[in-house]
Amino acid sequence: MSHILSLRGTGQPIAYFPKLGKYIGCVKAGIFLGQMVFWSDKTDSPLGVYKTSDQIEEETGLSYREQVSARKKLVALGLISETYKRLDHRLYFKFNEERFDEWLSEMILANLQSVISPTDESAVREQTKAQFVPTENTTDINTHSNAHAENQNVDSWTPDLEQLAFALKTTKYSQRVSEILGMADFQFHLGNFNAHHENNHQITNNQKLRKFAQWIFQEFEKQLAKAEREATKTKTHTTEKQNSRNVNDAWGEVQQYAPASDIDCGGLL
């Protein structure tokens, strides 16, 4: 007898994110948080979602004591907030998305830092020095220097280059982080980024780091696309030049004939 039908009749499966349990340090808290994420967009109440302990146990399998322990961890981290309506005897759970984004970024960066060896970190520091090497293109330097000077009027934010490198290592250009950090226009793009967010006083440093990583990543892609276009243009020009021929080439080599006096006329003259 197959028990698969019986298993399906015991209830609905839930989504579980193993990384959440790992980052929180508690699998049960990870399960509880995952369920709060699931319900967060399914309520219109500003207080969050209302759930009884019995309902949560039915959905997650967590006992009341396990729920209490998980809730304490999540509230302490600021990932959820609780509101108890005494008159209604209702407990509401609200998933704090902004705090979650900040916290998860911190966890990802910390995890990346833990798996990169000291040798790799030293290499990153050495590679980032390349961004301060002057280029020979004085026109670009003057233009970018002026823009950078103008952007000094706003509060200048500077990213932690090591943390930025760690964030960039999660992208498809993970093997080209040194090239991104060594872009000649790096400071110019940083100035533009600061100018763009000068009026956004609510953004945290971690959020700025994530946004700037995305910003500089896109600028690097633009640089690659431009280089590819120029390479294609050069290749096309070279091919056209090789295919072009002088109008006289069609005649080929001019045949050389012997002088008439050297021809044996066989006594005809």
Image (cartoon, rainbow, N blue to C red):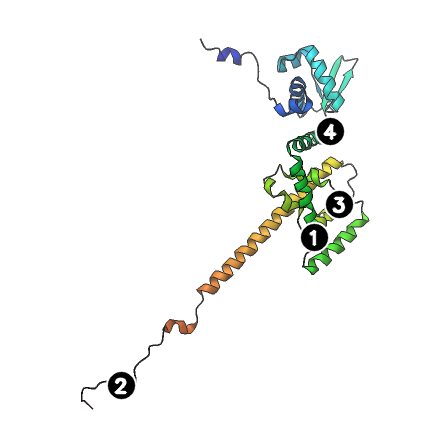
Contact between labelled residues 3 and 1, with CB atoms less than 8 Å apart: no
The answer to whether the residues at label 3 and label 4 have Cβ atoms under 8 Å apart is: no
The image quarter containing residue 16 is: top right
Q: Residues within 10 Å of mark 3 (few under 14, many from 20)?
A: many
Name the disc covering residue 194, or none.
3
Name the amino acid, label 3: Asn
Instruction: Give how far apart the Cα atoms at labels 2 and 4 are.
Output: 103 Å
N-terminal of the pair, mark 3 or mark 2, is 3
- The circle drawn on residue 74 is none
Q: Secondary structure at mark 3?
A: helix
Give the answer, above or below, for where 156 lies relative to 28. below
Q: Is residue 135 shown left or right of residue 172? A: right
Disc nearer the start of the sequence (2/1): 1
| Mark 1 / mark 4, whichever is N-terminal | 4
188 to 96, vertically: above or below: below
Q: Nearer the viewer, mark 3 or mark 2?
A: 2
Q: Tell me the kind of residue under disc 2.
A: Asp
Residue found at the far bottom of this picture: 269
Residue 92 visible in rendering: no
- Across and down, in percent, residue 78 comes to 75, 24
Give the secondary structure at mark 4: helix
Q: Is residue 245 left or right of residue 152?
A: left
Dot placed on the residue nearer the N-terminal end, 2 or 4: 4
Asked whether residue 131 is in view, the answer is yes
Look at mark 4 in the image and give the residue it sits on. Answer: 99
Identify which amino acid the numbered label 1 is placed on.
Answer: Val
Which amino acid, by three-letter code, is at mark 4? Arg
151 left or right of 57?
A: right
Which residue lies under the disc numbered 1? Answer: 133
